[in-house]
């Protein structure tokens, strides 16, 4: 895997920011090493590429940096060679059995890098698990339905794959407000938005979206503590009681968006959609947004019926046929007639 194609490089550049010094010191690059004066005068974060033949040069340049300077090194090397580095390090295996090493005099940089890398790793594990076909019908419908400049809400974002899909559809002038009740998921959304180049229009926050009657609620883990199945009901998707309980902050959409116009809302909250809908009554009246709902059983029927009472029509996402009675489908669109 070439460095230009590797997620670690993208993540390191994201952390250091666009204003940085970047030098390729590997033996095959043919580029001269910068002087210590050149680096110190710039005052910019430093990103270095190295291999075993450049270890002396890299070490010398690192020693010239202050303890507070942001430095990152990506080193193509064997695991034996990586043991020669005295600074904090993180080793990552790659398909060609070589290793990426990032090291820094700033422990905070290393910690941030590791967290962002883990977020992108979770992202790719999900895509690999479904052979890249993650929610394909949903993503295709987003491409058809969402318009440039729209302001969207993603309730139950997981790690942000669909939030970022929305962001691509609405373009630079649009916005996606992303919410997840599990704190790590909300953090991953922001990391993955930066990784996918949509950070300018995706804003993720850690809240359970409810009817707003309580400032905090209990969150349960679901099956196997999977990050996609944390829920407010204490019952997993197989109908079994969840094992773990933590307390998380809760807000309603009406409380978060008292006056802002919203064009589209996606709701996927493992059986708690009725509370979400109850907590967005003002938004429904003001904006009449298009809705996408992933249906998780009888507990969500009251919310669905309230939408109907407000003049919304339900459609099956796959067949594009209207839903009659209580024959609810897993993926539904709710829209107001023109």
Image: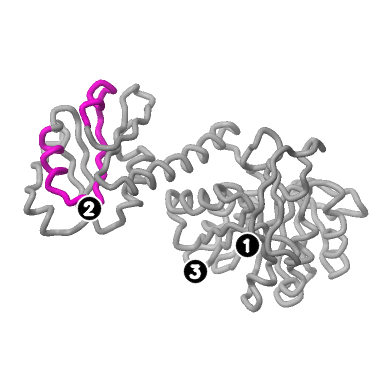
Q: Which mark is residue 173?
A: 3
Q: Residue at x 60, y 48 (%)?
A: 158
Disc 1 on helix, strand or loop? strand
Q: Residues within 10 Å of mark 1 (few under 14, many from 20)?
A: many
- Residue 320 vertical placement versus 212 (above, below): above
- Specify start and end residues of the magenta stretch as a single range: 56-85
Select label 3 or label 2 by which is in front: 2
Mark 1 and mark 2: Cα distance apart in space? 38 Å
Question: Which x, y percent locates residue 24?
Answer: 18, 40
Q: Are marks 1 and 2 in contact (CB under 8 Å)?
A: no
Q: Earlier in the sequence, mark 1 or mark 2?
A: 2
Q: Residue at x 71, y 47 (%)?
A: 231
Residue nearer the viewer, 219 or 319: 219
Task: Tell me if residue 319 can be seen.
Answer: no
Residue nearer the viewer, 149 or 151: 151
Residue 216 part of the magenta segment: no
Q: Earlier in the sequence, mark 1 or mark 3?
A: 1
Mark 3 and mark 2: Cα distance apart in space? 35 Å
- Residue 233 vertical placement versus 278 (above, below): above
Q: Residue at x 73, y 64 (%)?
A: 214
Q: Residues within 10 Å of mark 3 (few under 14, many from 20)?
A: few
Q: What residue is disc 2 on?
A: 69
Q: What residue is disc 1 on?
A: 153
Disc 3 on helix, strand or loop? loop
Q: How many marks?
A: 3
Q: Residue at x 55, y 47 (%)?
A: 184
Select label 1 or label 2 by which is in front: 2
């Amino acid at each position: 895997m070439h460095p230009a194609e590797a997620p670690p490089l993208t993540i390191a550049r994201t952390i250091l920011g666009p204003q940085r010094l970047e030098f390729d010191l590997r033996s095959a690059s043919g580029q001269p090493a910068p002087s210590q004066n050149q680096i110190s005068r710039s005052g910019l974060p430093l990103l270095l590429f190295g291999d075993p033949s450049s270890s002396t040069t890299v070490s010398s340049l690192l020693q010239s940096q202050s303890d507070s300077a942001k430095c990152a090194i990506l080193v193509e090397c064997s695991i034996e060679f990586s043991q020669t580095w005295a600074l904090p390090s993180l080793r990552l295996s790659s398909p060609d059995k070589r290793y990426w090493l990032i090291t820094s005099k700033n422990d905070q940089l290393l910690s941030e890098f590791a967290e962002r890398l883990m977020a992108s790793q979770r992202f790719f594990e999900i895509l690999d698990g479904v052979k890249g076909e993650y929610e394909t019908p949903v993503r295709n419908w987003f491409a058809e339905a969402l318009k440039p400049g729209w302001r969207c809400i993603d309730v139950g974002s997981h790690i942000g794959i669909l939030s970022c899909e929305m962001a691509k559809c609405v373009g630079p002038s649009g916005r996606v407000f992303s919410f997840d009740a599990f704190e790590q998921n909300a953090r991953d959304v922001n990391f993955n938005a930066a990784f996918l180049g949509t950070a300018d229009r995706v804003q993720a926050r850690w809240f359970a979206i409810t009817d707003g009657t309580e400032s905090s609620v209990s969150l349960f883990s679901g099956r196997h503590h999977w990050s996609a199945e944390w829920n407010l009901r204490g019952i997993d998707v197989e109908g079994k009681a969840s094992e773990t309980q933590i307390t998380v902050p809760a807000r309603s959409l009406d409380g978060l968006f008292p006056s802002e116009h919203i064009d589209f809302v996606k709701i996927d909250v493992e059986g708690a959609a009725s509370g979400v809908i109850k907590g967005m009554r003002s938004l429904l009246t003001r904006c009449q947004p298009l809705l996408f709902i992933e249906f998780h059983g009888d507990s969500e029927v009251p919310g669905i019926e309230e939408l109907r009472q407000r003049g919304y029509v339900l459609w099956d996402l796959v067949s594009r046929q209207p839903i009659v009675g209580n024959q609810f489908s897993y993926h539904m669109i709710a829209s107001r007639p023109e």
